[in-house]
Image (spheres, rainbow, N blue to C red):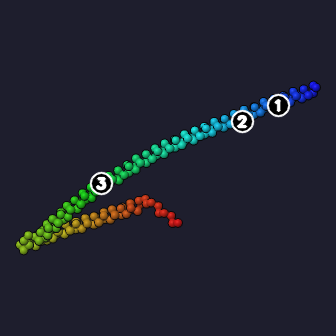
Amino acid sequence: MIVPRLLDRAALIAAAVAIVALAANTVRVVLERNAARAETAAVKFEFAHHREVAALAAADAERAYRRQEAQWTRQHEDARRQHEVELQAQARRVAAAAADGQRLRHQLAAFAAGGDAARDSVDACRRRAATLGQLLAEADGLAGEFAAAAEQHAGEVRLLRDAWPRPAAPEPQ
């Protein structure tokens, strides 16, 4: 009788120990699951925070780019308007130079004709011819300087045009 009672007690104790172990294991598993859930929630929260920060940074970058784009557009428009003003001023200067040139040609023609050349002395004709020669030599020198300056300017324009960045050509497929 004692043996079955001991066995019953031992079985009860073993069952109680098993239940306690099972309860302890269940508590451990529940705590681990809760910790994993908390860690997952923290990671999700951090991810959402980083996503929000990235969205704000992207919006800031977009606004900065749009401001820069607007500034470039204003600069382009200002440069275009300034170019138009310069072209108009250049056209006025060219017209004035053409009128001055025409007046100078008339004056030179009148000077070369010499008023009443039949009464002028040979010496007066020679002085007039020498003066005209100096004027023509000076005009020829200025024309050469202007041509050289124009060629230099054209070379600078070609250099600027050739050095200006171009969009890359699409790759052939």
Q: Residues within 10 Å of mark 1 (few under 14, many from 20)?
A: few
Residue 117 horizontal/vertical position (percent): 8, 72
Mark 3 sits on what residue? 81
Q: Which residue is mark 1?
A: 15
Determine which residue is flagged by label 2: 29
Mark 3, secondary structure of its residue: helix
Q: CA distance from mark 1 to mark 3?
A: 97 Å
Tell me if mark 3 has few (under 14), some (14-19) or many (20+) residues whose alpha carbon lies within 10 angstroms of its own.
few
Left or right position of 141 against 117 = right
Q: Is residue 19 above or below residue 88?
A: above
Disc 2 residue type (three-letter) = Val
Q: Secondary structure at mark 2?
A: helix
Label located before the other in sequence (3 or 2): 2
Mark 3 in CB contact with mark 2 (< 8 angstroms): no
Q: Quadrant of the N terminus?
A: top right
Three-letter amino acid code of the residue under disc 3: Arg
**CA–CA distance in space, label 3 to label 2:** 76 Å
Q: Residue furthest front?
A: 1
Residue 23: image location, x then y, percent: 75, 31
